[in-house]
Image (cartoon, grey):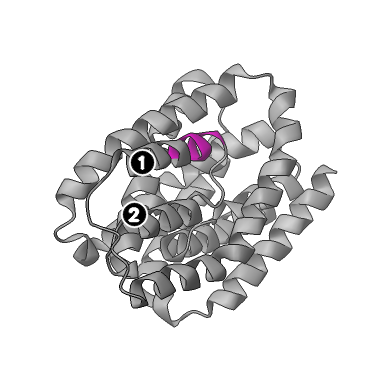
């Protein structure tokens, strides 16, 4: 790895850590960056996942005040995220590697669509709350199932899992969006951690890439937690879309 590549990956990791803490989908910065630098898709996905774990923890810690009173909720949802992540990461490793090379194009398109649709989803959720609809604060079996499904997606690929989790939590739980975002950060950390453990013991990892992303995403996680509310989400989404489209061009 050249010094230039290391700096680029570090900066991508910092951007991803910031974005993951605020809205999710930071992998659409780091993963396409690794692809553009010539890393094979499977190796890039695995190394990216492990490198983002410290950033996920950093973001979750940054939102610790919003986690107050959510311990019961998290105790019921975390096992679903862990089981989903274990399933998704196992699928990634057991399916033929060329299968991921093909499906990753579809996953990037889906993830970019979710990024673009994010504001619309948020507006719909806000409108439902403003109308006084009862969502309830109970962790229902349907919510647990959808959180597990998000974990499968996160363990397999991960990009935009934060947006998926935020939407799912917002539909089922009547709470402030920042508190749901804090819950999302913890669940995403659990997914990334479980998948990382599986990858570390079962497949090849580029530890130089991991180190660059880990340091960058840890710093980014704190930036997102501290200044995230001041950043223009339209600029963040535009950046994600541009980088994601660049990756698609590289893969096609």
In percent of width and height, residue 103 lies at 71, 35
Depth check: give the residue in front, 119 or 10: 119
Q: CA distance from mark 1 to mark 2?
A: 9 Å
Residue 142 shows which numbered tag?
Answer: 1
Q: Which residues are magenta?
A: 151-156
Could one spot residue 192 in this view of the protein?
Answer: no
Q: Residue at x 22, y 56 (%)?
A: 137
Relative placement, left or right, of 214 versus 75 is right
Residue 74 in magenta?
A: no
SS label for mark 2: helix
In percent of width and height, residue 49 lies at 51, 41
For the stretch drawn in magenta, what is the main secondary structure? helix
In percent of width and height, residue 14 lies at 51, 61
Depth check: give the residue in front, 57 or 95: 95
Residue at the disc numbered 2:
172
Relative placement, left or right, of 77 versus 244 is left
Residue 154 in magenta?
A: yes
- Among numbered discs 1 and 2, the one appearing first in the sequence: 1
Q: Are marks 1 and 2 in contact (CB under 8 Å)?
A: yes
Q: Residue at x 47, y 47 (%)?
A: 52
Considering only vertical position in the picture, is 158 above or below 42? below
């Amino acid at each position: 790895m050249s010094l230039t590549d290391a700096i680029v990956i570090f900066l991508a990791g910092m951007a991803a850590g910031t974005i993951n803490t605020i809205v999710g989908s930071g992998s659409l910065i780091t993963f396409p960056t690794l692809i553009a630098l010539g890393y094979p898709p499977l190796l890039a996905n695995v190394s990216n996942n492990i490198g983002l774990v410290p950033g996920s923890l950093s973001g979750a810690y940054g939102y610790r005040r919003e986690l107050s009173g959510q311990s019961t909720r998290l105790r019921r949802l975390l096992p679903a995220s862990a089981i989903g992540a274990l399933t998704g990461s196992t699928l990634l490793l057991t399916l033929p590697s060329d299968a991921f090379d093909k499906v990753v194009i579809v996953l990037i398109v889906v993830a970019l669509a979710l990024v673009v649709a994010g504001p619309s989803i948020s507006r719909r959720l806000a409108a439902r709350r403003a109308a006084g609809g009862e969502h309830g604060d109970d962790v229902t079996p349907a919510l647990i199932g959808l959180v597990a499904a998000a974990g499968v997606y996160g363990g397999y690929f991960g990009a935009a899992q934060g947006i998926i989790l935020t939407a799912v939590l917002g539909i089922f739980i009547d709470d402030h969006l920042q508190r749901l975002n804090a819950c999302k950060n913890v669940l995403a950390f659990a997914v990334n951690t479980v998948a990382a453990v599986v990858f570390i013991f079962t497949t090849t990892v580029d530890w130089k890439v991991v180190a660059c992303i880990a340091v960058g995403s840890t710093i980014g996680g704190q930036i997102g937690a501290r200044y995230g509310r001041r950043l223009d989400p339209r600029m963040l989404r535009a950046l994600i879309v541009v980088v994601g489209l660049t990756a698609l061009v590289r893969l096609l």
